[in-house]
Amino acid sequence: MKQSEIPRDKKWISLFFERVEDIVKIIETHPLMIKTSEWFKPSRGNSIYSIWALDHGRRPDLGAKDFFYFSRDKIDDWNVKVKGFKEAVMKYLVPAITASRYVRTFIFTEKDWIEIRDRGKEERGKSKYSDAWILVLHEDRKNIPQQLQEYIKWGETECKTQIRATRGGGKICSKAEACKAREKAEAKAYFYGWYDLGGYIPTPIMAIYQPRYHPQFFLTLLPKLITYHAVITLVPRVKIKVANETYDPIEYNRVYGNVIDNIKPSIELDEIEIKALLAYLNSTFNWLWLEQKARYIAKGPLGLEVHVIKDMPIPNIKSIDRRHVEDLAQLFEKLEFSARSIIGDSSNESVSEEEKGVGKLEMFKRLRSIFREIDSKIAEILKINVNVDELWDYAWKMMERRVEGAGRKVRPGAEIEIEIKEEKESEKRKGRKRRKRSSEGKVTPLTKWFKQGDNKDHKKSS
C-alpha cells in the first residue's frame, strides 16, 4: 500500500477488516438508528461534579477517594474516634460502585451491592471490608453535624491522596485538583465547597469505562446508586420507568440547577424498551462499532470516551415494532440469566477470576450462542444481510489483536523509551571508578531487545 493511500481520519485497523467498515457505515446511516446523545448525556460517573467537570473541560474523578470512599471498617473506626459519627454519617452515605470489577454481569442489583458491602478479606488477622459507599455532603458546612465537621477538618489537615507523587499525589485531600475546582467561583452555583460532590443523578444504564475484552453495558436496579469515574453513565435526557422507579431529567434539573441539557420531555421509555436497548448495546454490531471507534489504550482495553459514546448509534426503539422490542428485551434477560449461571458466586474478593475458574473472557465465550441470537434479531429488525457468525469472528479477531498487541515483546525497529539520567558535573570529577558505580542499575543491556545469536556463520563467511 502506498503511503498516500493510508487513511488519516480513521483507525488503520480498517485496512485489515474492510467488511467491518461497511457494517459500521450501515449502522451509522440506518434510518432506524439515532445517536446516543439524542436520548442520553454520557458521562464518567453520575455525581453532579463528574457531569459538571466534563462540561467544563476538567477531569471527572472525585478528587480524593480516601476522603469520599467509605467501608464498614472506616465507619466503625471513625465511630470510635468521634462519638456519634456513625449515626451522623449514614444520612450522607450513598451506595456506590467504587471499582469496575464489582460489575460481573449485565444487571447490577441490590444483592450485588450488599455482597460488596459485606465482602471482607483477611489482612493481618483482621477482616477488611470493601469500599461500598461514597460520601455526598451536599449541604452548607455550617449546617452539617459536628461529627462531620470534624471529618472535614481531617480532610484539610491529615488526609492525603494516595496516588503517586509523579501524578500529583501525596497532597492534603482538600488540595486535590478536583477538590480545588469545586472551590472556584465558577463552581459555587453547584457546590458548597471542596468536600461537596453536588449530589448525583440516578442513572439506569451504565457501562465499564475500559473493558478489556467485550464491552459491558449493564442495567442498575438501584436508583440510589453513585459511581466513580471509571464507569460510563448514560444520564437520561428522556423520562425512564424501570422496576417501579421513574427517572425524570426535568426533576433532576429542578434540584441540581439544569445540569442536563437538551431534554426530550415528550419521550418516555419503559423497562422493556430499556432492556431492548441494552440487548443492542451488548450486541456484536455495537462491539464492532466500538472496536472501530473507541480509543486504544496502551495496555489493551478499549477506552469508551464520552465523546465516542455521544456518537454511538443506538436503535430508535420508538420506531421499531413493539413485538421486536419485546423479543430483544427477552434476549437481554436470557443473556443476564446465562451470565449469572456461568460466572457463579463472587462473594470472595480475595480469589481472582482465574482462580474461580471463570473470568470475563471465558464468560463472553460461553455466551456466544446468545449473542448470536441477539445479532440475528438485530439483523432482522434493521434488514441487514450479514452473516452474524462472520460478524462475531471479525469482532473477536479485532479484540485479540488489541489485547495481544499490548503484551507484544519489543522487536528491533520498534520505538522505545529509555530513561537517561544526566551525570552531575561533580560525579565527572570523581573519576572513572566512581562513574562506573553510579551507573549500576541504570544501564539497559541490548539483550533486552535483541536475541544473542551464534556468530559461527559470520566467522566462516569472513
Image: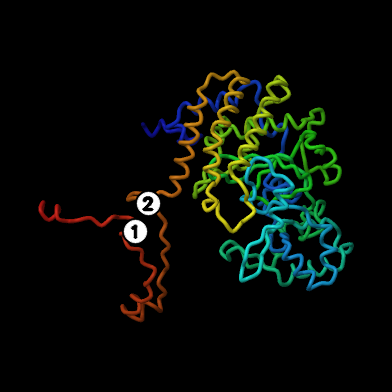
Determine whether the residue tagged by mark 1 lies in a helix, strand or loop. Answer: helix
Nearer to us in this view, 447 or 277: 277
Q: Amino acid at mark 2?
A: Val
Q: Residue 1, how many percent across, how many down?
A: 36, 31
Residue 460 lies left or right of residue 439; in this view the side is left
Q: Quadrant of the C terminus?
A: bottom left
Q: Which numbered disc, 2 or 1, marks the residue that appears first in the sequence?
A: 2
Q: Residue 422, how many percent across, how many down?
A: 41, 69
Nearer to us in this view, 192 or 341: 341
Nearer to us in this view, 348 or 88: 348
- Work out whether 261 lies above or below 378: below
Badge 1 crowding class, 10 Å Cα cut-off, few under 14, some 14 to 19, many 20 or more, is few
- Work out whether 335 lies above or below 426: above
Nearer to us in this view, 51 or 211: 211
Q: Which residue is mark 2?
A: 410
Mark carried by residue 286 = none
The image quadrant of residue 67 is bottom right
- Work out whether 256 lies above or below 330: below
Q: Which residue is mark 1?
A: 448
Q: Write the residue at 65% across / 47% down.
A: 231
Q: Amino acid at mark 1?
A: Lys
Res. 248 in view: no
How far apart, in angstroms, are the residues tagged by discs 2 and 1?
9 Å
Residue farthest to the bottom? 430
Q: Residue 160, how many percent across, how many down?
A: 67, 68
What's the image's color scheme?
Answer: rainbow
Q: Residue 167, how many percent across, how many down?
A: 58, 61
Q: Contact (CB < 8 A) between labels 2 and 1? A: yes
Determine whether the residue tagged by mark 2 lies in a helix, strand or loop. Answer: loop
